[in-house]
Image (spheres, grey):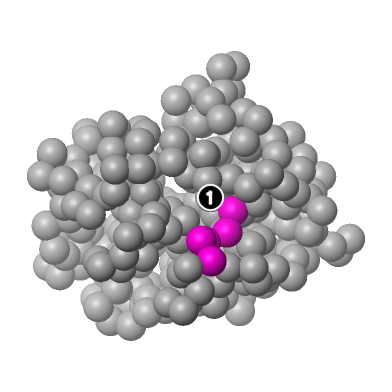
Amino acid sequence: MIDIDAAIGYVVGHGDPVERARLSHLRTGHPAPPDAVERIAAGQMPEGGWPASAEGGIPSVDATCYRLAELDGIGALNSPVGIQALQWLAAAQRGDGTWQEHESLADEAPAWAMPGDPEATLYQTSVAGFWLTAAAVEIDPHQTRAPWSEVLRSAARWVVTQIRPDGTWPSFLAVGWHAAGLLHQQQFFYESARVQQVLGDRLTDMSPGDVASMAAALRRVNLGDDWLLQSARKRLAETQRPDGGWDSNEGPLFDVNTTLTVLRACR
């Protein structure tokens, strides 16, 4: 079993103000205080997105999805700041249903956000589609009045064309859980189930950070049978450190973030 109390103690002892606000939201369900939202909103451009760097002059799909994840962590995904970002993201979709960074960002873009790269296009489309899906589900869990419905349907139709017959995909690991959530919510149940099966097969080789990110993401949509989430929580219990935290893929400075992600996955 995951030691929740130890994980909470680790975040309290090592977290910054925004991370402690995330913990408070997870424990109480109350939205974070305005100053926590303001910290994340700093740098948001008039269009609604965030630039790739502090000096950037063009909104970035990757940076905006990162900020949306931060807002989601404090219960502010559908706050005015979040809605403005989501509306920009929906408007930035390309005609074929995909998302790509602006070509002017090529010199500074990481591999997963490289304009024109097929692997990056699948990653960005899955992640952008996922965050629009998560926001839509939060607004209406039953999706009877789903916002961005055409945007999401177009994205899902394109992602389906990229899933191989065996359920694998030609891109980064994180595509799997973002695509599974997007496809499931758009009623591509068979394709989503195949992707989930691949994720389950890879679980023992995944890092704690990846397992936590997967479980937290899939909790945001209505998956139904949660065998994969149960397996992920078991794996996380096996990898919890004696101090209550988990190792991040990005190094010790991000261990609190990974621990918070685990707590979100287990909430």
Does the segment drawn in magenta span residue 205?
no
Percent x, y of residue 95: 68, 44
Question: Crowdedness of circle 1 by 10 Å Cα count: few (<14), some, many (20+)?
Answer: many
Q: Vertical placement of 61 versus 151: above or below? A: below
**Secondary structure mostly taken by the magenta-highlighted segment of the chain:** loop
Q: Residue at x 23, y 54 (%)?
A: 43
Q: Is residue 141 left or right of residue 157?
A: left
Q: Position of residue 227 (x, y in %)?
A: 64, 51
**Above-or-below relation of 51 to 104:** above
As drawn, the residue found furthest toward the right would be 165
Residue at the image point whose x is 29% and y is 33% from the top: 79
- 93 or 214: which is nearer to us? 93
Residue 202 visible somewhere in the drawing:
yes
Range of the magenta residues? Answer: 99-103
Quarter assignment of residue 152: top right
Disc 1 residue type (three-letter)? Ala
Which sits in the foreground, 253 or 50?
Answer: 50
Residue 156 position within the rendered picture, expressed as x and y whole percent measured from the top left: 70, 44
From the viewer's side, name the closer residue of 108 and 161: 108
- In the rendered image, residue 17, in percent from the top left (x then y), is placed at 11, 57
Quadrant occupied by the N terminus: bottom left
- Mark 1 falls on what kind of element? helix
Q: Nearer the viewer, residue 218 or 71?
A: 71
- Give me the residue at 19% from left, 40% from top: 32
Lateral position of residue 26 relative to residue 166, left or right: left
Q: Residue at the far bottom: name it.
A: 251
Say whether residue 119 is left or right of residue 53. Answer: right
Residue sitting at 22 percent across and 48 percent down? 41
Asked where in the image residue 87 lies, by quadrant, the reply is top left
One can see residue 234 in this view = no
Compared to residue 135, the image places residue 60 above or below, namely below
Q: Give the labeled residue for mark 1.
A: 128
